[in-house]
Amino acid sequence: MAIPALVFFIAFGVVPLVGVLALSFARWDGIGAIHPAGFDSWHAVLTDPGLPHALWVTFEVMFFSWAVQTPASILIGVFLSGHQRYREFLAVLYFVPLLLSSAALAVTYKALLDPNFGLGPGLHFGLLTRDWLGSGGLAMGVIIFVVSWQFIPFHALIYQGGVRQIPASMYEAASLDGAGRVRQFFSITLPQLKYTVITSSTLMVVGSLTFFDLIYVLTAGGPGDSTRVLALDMYQQGFQANLMGPASAIAVIIVLVGLVLALVLRRLGGRGVESQLEGA
């Protein structure tokens, strides 16, 4: 069974990465012939003052979306872990945003938040008549909100499964000792969800590096370049400026950042020798 998996991993994982790495040392406009260019693309990317800014904006999106999604996903996952019928119905209903495409969500929110023709003027609601996408801080807030709204259901589903793996005997023993629901949550549920938190956080952090379509449709990196993330920078270099070499170099940087962050989170998770029942 390992050989087919290895073949698929090499075909769909290693080969594309090697191709992108090779293109980062070439000059290509996406149509004509490919010419070797040495380190020209890397020099152009690493000396571009826009790279540190795009990297900083990417980390902003990553951190704030993680900070919003994690506690909300844990609380919703714990709530949905109950076996009551209404909770199972809510779990199905709550999963709907994840079925929608990021581009469709971006178009919808962009229309709803339009200060002239959106939801605010229609309802005569002053708060929504602000130009939410016309200010850098507000646009970042909108991006964080839409990302969280779309992906919290997915991570809540992961936490729901994690909570259901915790033995009920632990809660029964805690109840006999007089522990209330809040004490049980902090003393039993959260510690037992340690590896689920690491898994969910890894998916959030690495996944946030690839946010492109939602940001492109919602703000196109603006206003100015206040929401220009690395993935959007890569697209603009490759498919708008037809500079596949620098775009490939940015893609390699995104892969390296993702690998480093994934390894850090894996190290934070430990080797699983603690007294964790989950995943044992």
Image (tube, grey):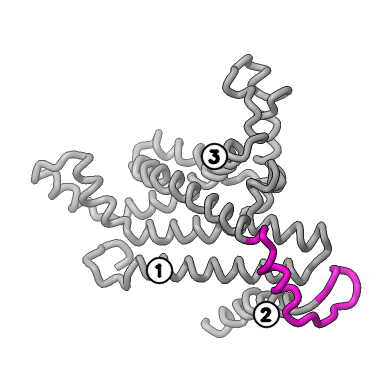
Q: Residues within 10 Å of mark 1 (few under 14, many from 20)?
A: some
Q: Residue at x 24, y 47 (%)?
A: 186
Residue 145's label in the rendered image is 3
Placement of 22 over or under 55, stated as above or below: below
In the image, what residue type sits under mark 3?
Phe
Give the number of callouts.
Answer: 3
Q: Residue at x 72, y 78 (%)?
A: 19
Q: Is residue 40 left or right of residue 60?
A: right
Q: Which residue is mark 1?
A: 266
Q: Is residue 246 left or right of residue 177?
A: right
Q: Is residue 96 visible?
A: no
- How much space separates mark 1 and mark 3, taking CA atoms? 27 Å
Residue 16's label in the rendered image is none
- Residue 49 in the image: state x and y as whole percent: 67, 60
Q: Which residues are magenta?
A: 27-51
Q: Is residue 57 left or right of residue 82?
A: right
Q: Which residue is mark 2?
A: 18
In the image, what residue type sits under mark 1?
Arg
Identify the element where label 3 is drawn. helix
Identify the element where label 1 is drawn. helix
Identify the element where label 2 is drawn. helix
Q: Residue at x 28, y 51 (%)?
A: 190
Residue furthest top as drawn = 124
Query: Which quarter of the figure is the C terminus placed in?
Result: bottom left
Q: Residues within 10 Å of mark 3 (few under 14, many from 20)?
A: some
In the image, what residue type sits under mark 2?
Val
- Residue 165 in the image: state x and y as whole percent: 31, 56
- Residue 169 in the image: state x and y as whole percent: 18, 52
Residue 20's quadrant in the figure? bottom right
Q: Is residue 101 left or right of residue 29?
A: left
User: For this rendering, which residue is in front, 75 or 124?
Assistant: 124
